[in-house]
Image (tube, rainbow, N blue to C red):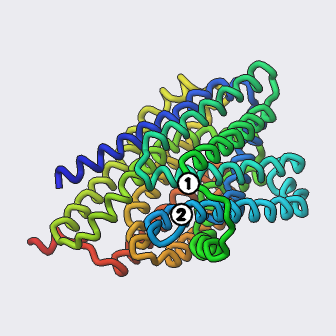
Amino acid sequence: MKTNFSSLFRTLSIYALSNIINASIPFLLLPVLTHYLSPSAFGIVAMFQVILSFSLPFSGLNVEGAVSRQFFEKQKIDFPVYVWNAIVILFTSSIVVLIIYFVTGQMIETLTDFPYNWLSLIVLCAFAQNLSEIGLAVWQVQYQALKYGLFRITRTVTDISISLFFVVTLRESWQGRVSAQVIAIFAFAIITLFFLKKEKMIRTQVNREYIKSAIRFGLPLVPHVIGAIVITMSDRIFITKMVGLSATGLYAAGYQVGMIIGLFQNSFNQAWVPWFYEKLKLNENKTNIGIVKFTYMYFLLMLAGVVLLTVITPYIFDIFLGKDYSSARIYVFWIGLGFAFNGMYKMVVNYFFYIQKTYIVSMITFMTALLNLLLNYFFIKEFGPIGAAQATVIAFFFQFIVVWYMSSKAYKMPWLFFIRNK
């Protein structure tokens, strides 16, 4: 098992390093943005991210997941044609989303306080980002982790460089930050197309069967993705409408620090999943006990990470954020704890993905999202913006416990090995 775990950690180190660098760049930009953007302007930037996140699954229908899955069937299908048809789906669904936003734009502006005339750029961003995700999915299944990481880091550096020029030099406030993201995401979507074509990973031929296949795979996952977005993003909408944009800006700043836990658990999950699937296929009791032991250690590591982050939070705020954002530190512990439970959830939900019972995951995520919406309303009403962070913790904990219980029924693992050995 030691050798096997060492290979896991080598892969993890590549993803973790690229993700840390990628996340550190905008984090290091926080002092600049919080200096040049008021909490209200920062709140509009946060709402741009919320609407973009909601748009992504409808624009892309999770076709990048279908591409990843079909890569392992490339002996049976024409994979480059499959990739092209995934892009066709992406383009078509993005047009549909654009039409919907054109019709409902005024309602969206009322709900989010995000300007109606900028919504079309969000759809463009959603299309471009989903296109890039297809390229990233291809590189990931080909084990090209270095290319994967360099692409994401370079895109982030480009985004931040343009942001600094627009916000600091041209003093364009939130418009400069949003415009920079649009330009960077679209430019790297074009680069994705270039690489896919160069690597002979796309061939322009429409195939109805491939289109049906990609839709059958991705469409059932839309509720799951939307539910996950509701859990992580709806808090900012509630705060905006119930408290105000300034409160949303403060919350978003504290949330970004708390997401440090999310960064680490996401990096681990990228490396863990292929290794985990490989070991489950062995169906060996000793190996399964090793997986369970490691899972328990990981749970403890997540909680220890929250404690450490809470201890260093005052220093992070003193160094990276201005005085206007000092009150945002109260959110960090709760957001960090929420992402710790989310990391634990990822360790147990992968059993459902392994046995391909994703509809169960969608149902649980949907229930969790409803719970989160209710808790957000009542907690914010009772406790203020901090209630949104506490609602996130409860929702993630509920999701983790329910999925753990149900996955233990669906796929038998020696979770109580320490009792049986006595």
Above or below residue 129? Residue 403 is below
Query: Where residue 254 appears, x then y in whole percent?
Result: 59, 40
Tell me: 80 left or right of 272: right
Figure quadrant of the N terminus: bottom left
Q: Amino acid at mark 1?
A: Met
Tell me: 145 left or right of 5: right
Query: Where residue 321 appears, x then y in whole percent?
Result: 60, 27
Alpha carbon separation for disc pair 1 and 2: 7 Å
Q: Identify the disc placed on residue 357.
A: none
**Label 1 CA crowd tier, 10 Å (few <14, some 14–19, many 20+):** some
Query: Where residue 355 appears, x then y in whole percent?
Result: 40, 76
Residue at image point 65% right, 67% down: 374
| Rendered image quadrant of residue 187 | top right
Q: Are marks 1 and 2 in contact (CB under 8 Å)?
A: yes
The residue to which callout 2 is attached is 79
In this orientation, which residue lies closer to the viewer: 136 or 16?
Answer: 136
In this orientation, which residue lies closer to the viewer: 65 or 342?
Answer: 65
Residue at image point 37% right, 50% down: 302
At mark 2, the secondary structure is helix
**Label 2 CA crowd tier, 10 Å (few <14, some 14–19, many 20+):** many
Figure quadrant of the C terminus: bottom left
Q: Identify the disc placed on residue 201.
A: 1
Q: Amino acid at mark 2?
A: Phe
